[in-house]
Amino acid sequence: MGKEKNPPRVAENEAMAVSRMLRTSPQKLNLVAAMIRNKPVDKALADLTFSKRRIAEDVKKTLQSAIANAENNHGLDVDELVVAEAYVGKNLVMKRGRPRARGRFGRIMKPFSQVTIKVRQIEEQA
């Protein structure tokens, strides 16, 4: 009589992690996400470690979380994981302001964003 179980959001050979409320614009965050798409996870972690962008540290934490989810929750092999998807979404925007000349008001927008990372296990070709 109860409700039906929701279908899983990831496949059996995938794992996912989401970071919300990252204090950067989605456009800047997407540059970092594009840097790691379709790469093996060890190469993606190395790229994020040595990136000069401030937000790369938060994306690295999200990738490490996705790797841990794959290993602990889905039983996947860490050495065969690839970043299948890394996409960015908008979150809230704080509106602030600053007084300007002649009684006007300068709007300051402080955007937040979120990043979703999916890792997928692939079998290495011999």
Image (cartoon, grey):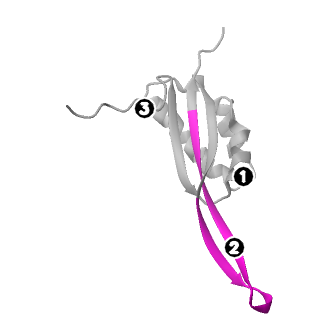
Which dot, 1 or 3, sits closer to the camera?
1
Give the residue pinned by disc 2.
Answer: 108
Q: Earlier in the sequence, mark 1 or mark 3?
A: 1
Q: Position of residue 100 (x, y in %)?
A: 76, 86
Q: Earlier in the sequence, mark 1 or mark 2?
A: 1
Element at label 2: strand
Rounded to the nearest angstrom, the CA distance separating label 1 from label 3 is 32 Å
Q: Position of residue 37 (x, y in %)?
A: 69, 34
Q: Are marks 2 and 3 in contact (CB under 8 Å)?
A: no
Q: Position of residue 114 (x, y in %)?
A: 58, 51
Element at label 1: helix
Asked which quadrant contains residue 78, the reply is top right
Q: Nearer the viewer, residue 14 or 69?
A: 14
Q: Mark 3 belongs to which amino acid?
A: Asn
Furthest toward the right, the residue is 101
Residue 29 in the image: above or below residue 120: below
Rounded to the nearest angstrom, the CA distance separating label 2 from label 3 is 43 Å
Q: Which residues are magenta?
A: 92-118
Residue 125 in the image: above or below residue 15: above
Rounded to the nearest angstrom, the CA distance separating label 1 from label 2 is 17 Å
> On residue 64, which mark appears?
none
Left or right, residue 107 beside residue 15: right
Give the residue pinned by disc 3.
Answer: 72
Q: Are marks 1 and 2 in contact (CB under 8 Å)?
A: no
Give the residue pinned by disc 1.
Answer: 27
Q: Is residue 1 magenta?
A: no
Answer few, some or many: residues within 10 Å of disc 1's Cα (few below 14, many 20 plus, some between 14 and 19): few
